[in-house]
Amino acid sequence: MNQKTNAMRILDQKKVLYNVLSYEVTSDEYKDGIESAEKLNLPLEKVFKTLVATSKSKKNYVFVIPVAKTLDLKLAAKLANEKNVELIHVKELLPTTGYMRGGCSPIGMKKLFPTFIDDSATNFDKIYISGGKIGTHLEINPNDLTKVIPVKFTKLTID
């Protein structure tokens, strides 16, 4: 039986429909979102990873992109109205967001950060995001994310 994560509790509270997909995690070793998508037999273009970036002014931003794509940091900085942004170090992820690498959901972070989702998400009725722990993904309508977090859909990846 799946334990509710913070992300799930928030979705339940806001009455947002979602489905939980999970796989057994056999060790603490997490490879990447592509491996997670393969373990769940999901199409890569529908599985999104959550990246957290910071600016020189110490403001944090969340970028949600397809797992097989790369974030365009110059474009991300421009969208955030910053000179530049860089991904936060893995050791900073848990204290900043409340989530660990491989289980970082855009929903339920310690603070609400400006969140940008790659506009390719709007091509689908359902996408898959981290459920808040390694091995757990949530199937959700991308537009429903706007009910729980401040979201802007825009191009984010390098072609």
Image (tube, rainbow, N blue to C red):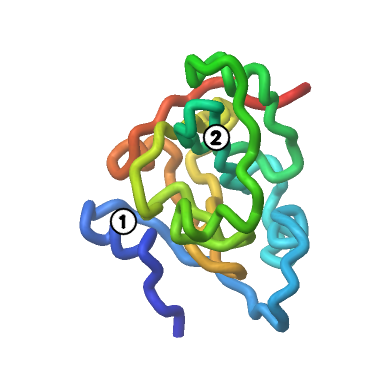
Residue 66 showing in the rendered view: yes
Label of residue 54 in the image:
2
Instruction: Give the percent coordinates (x, y) of residue 3.
Output: 41, 79
Image vertical order of residue 24 relative to residue 119, above or below: below
Q: Which residue does the image show at 53% across and 51% down from the upper left?
A: 129
Q: Residue at x 44, y 60 (%)?
A: 98
The image shows residue 53, relative to residue 47, as above or below, that is above
Kindly tell me whether residue 131 is visible in this rendering.
no
> Amino acid under label 2?
Thr
SS category of the residue bearing label 2: strand
Mark found first going from the N terminus, 2 or 1: 1
- To which quarter of the image does residue 84 belong? top right
Image: 33 above or below 74: below
Q: Which residue is mark 1?
A: 11
x%, y% of residue 116?
Answer: 49, 30
Q: Nearer the viewer, residue 110 or 69?
A: 110
Image quarter of residue 91: bottom right
- Badge number at residue 131: none
Q: Quadrant of the N terminus?
A: bottom left
Residue 128 picture location, percent across and down? 55, 51
Disc 2 to disc 1, how far (Cα)? 26 Å
- Amino acid on which disc 1 is placed: Leu
In the image, taking residue 91 as reference, residue 60 lies left or right, namely left
